[in-house]
Every structure is written in C-alpha cells, then in structure tokens.
Image (cartoon, grey):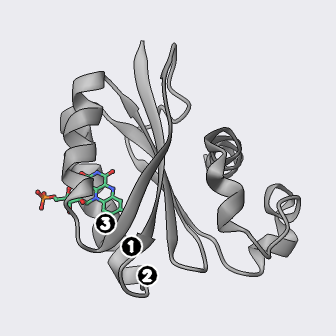
Amino acid sequence: MFRQIVYTSQASEPVSESDCEEILQQSRANNVRDGVTGFLLSLPNGTFVQTLEGPPDGISNVLERIREDDRHTSLTVILDHTIPARDFPDWRMGYRAVRRDDLRTIPEFRNLGDSDFAENFDSGAIAISIMKSLYDANR
Ligand SMILES: Cc1cc2nc3c(=O)[nH]c(=O)nc-3n(C[C@H](O)[C@H](O)[C@H](O)COP(=O)(O)O)c2cc1C
C-alpha cells in the first residue's frame, strides 16, 4: 500500500520555466531516494498542484522538505489517503505548466471553466484525473 497526497500552494514570486526546471531536477534526484513519484502542475495564476505517492515515511520526508521551501506559501493538503498501486509509476516527477490556451484546447481543462480555475482543484480527485490524462499522453 502507498500513501498518496495532493496539495496546492501559491508561488511566492512569478515562476519562470527555469525555476520549474530547478524544482524538477531537485525532485527527481531526491524522490528516488525516498521512493516517491508524482506529478506537478503549475497554473497560470501561480498556483502549484502536486501529487506525491510512495511509502508513508518517504511522503513525510518529502512533504517536510517542500513545506520549508520559501519559493511557495499557503501549502494546503487537499487529499491524503492510501492507494493499492501508484497512479504515476515512472521514476520521474511528471510536470506540466498549464497555459491559458490549455484551458480552451485540452478537454480536461475546458470542462473546468477558467474563471475560478484554481478553485476547481479543491477536489484532489479532479486534480489527479487531469494529471493522469496528461501523464498518459506523454508516455
Ligand atoms: C512546488 C514545489 C514542488 C516541489 N516538489 C519537490 C519534490 O517532489 N521533491 C523534492 O525533493 N523537492 C521538491 N521541491 C523542492 C524542495 O522544496 C526542496 O527545495 C528540495 O527538496 C531541497 O533539495 P536539496 O536538499 O537537494 O537541496 C519542490 C519545491 C516546490 C516549490
């Protein structure tokens, strides 16, 4: 069994592609050590939504590191449960920078409507289903 969590947070400053590259490089190096896989979305308004899954101890370690990171604030765990198998089994942190255009052209986003886009991620289950379809499309 694995622990899976979804959290949202707010970037402290506007995030560039190179900021995200750095976060991903750190994640990929560290998460392997903790047995943690997952997916990170960055939304146009500066919201991050991340799924993390793995052994309970590994998740605690990663979450502790991420909570202390001053590149983001207001970290809120919106889903925390046990799963029988990983949704994101590859040894990499999946990633997608969501652009405003995506909200119109990608079906999963279109259904959310774009006015209160970040608020729609209050449901961790919706966030995971969107991440899974992006993850599967990129395999
Ligand atoms: C939105 C966001 C997501 C992050 N995700 C991860 C992650 O999945 N794994 C990880 O190890 N670090 C992640 N980080 C970076 C950590 O907060 C921390 O900076 C890093 O783990 C420190 O690595 P180091 O000790 O190797 O320097 C994330 C940071 C942000 C802002």
How many other residues sit within 10 Å of disc 3, few (<14), some (14-19) or many (≥20)? some
Q: Residue at 61% x, 47% y: name it.
A: 135
Cβ at disc 3 under 8 Å from ligand 1: yes
The residue under label 2 is which amino acid type?
A: Glu
Residues tagged 1 and 2 counted as in contact (Cβ below 8 A):
yes
Ligand 1 lies in quarter: bottom left
Q: Position of residue 73 (x, y in %)?
A: 35, 69
- Look at the picture and state if 105 lies above or below 44: above
Q: Amino acid at mark 3?
A: Ile
* Whole-number angstrom distance, CA of label 1 to CA of label 3: 5 Å
Q: Does residue 82 lie above or below 103 as drawn?
A: above
- Residue type highlighted by circle 1: Cys
Residue in the image at 71% along x and 44% along y: 126
Q: Disc 2, ligand 1: is the CB inside 8 Å?
A: no
Q: Tell me: 7 left or right of 18.
A: right
Is disc 2 placed on a helix, strand or loop? helix
Q: Which mark is residue 23?
A: 3
Q: Quadrant of the N terminus?
A: top left
| Residue 15 percent across, percent down from the top left | 42, 83
Q: Nearer the viewer, residue 56 or 27?
A: 56
Query: Given contact means CB atoms under 8 Å apart, are the residues at marks 2 and 3 in contact?
Result: no
Question: On screen, 13 above or below 42?
Answer: below
Label 1 neighbour load within 10 Å: few <14, some 14-19, many 20+: some
Secondary structure type for disc 3 = helix
Which residue was labeled with disc 1?
20
Q: Mark 1 and 3 residues: CB-CB less than 8 Å, in contact?
A: yes
Kindly identify which residue carries mark 2. 17
Q: Residue at x 65, y 66 (%)?
A: 118
How far apart in space, not on screen, are marks 2 and 3 (Cα)?
Answer: 10 Å
Identify the residue shown where x is 29% and y is 74%: 71
Position of residue 135 in the picture relative to residue 3 (left or right) = right
Left or right of 94: which side holds 27?
A: left
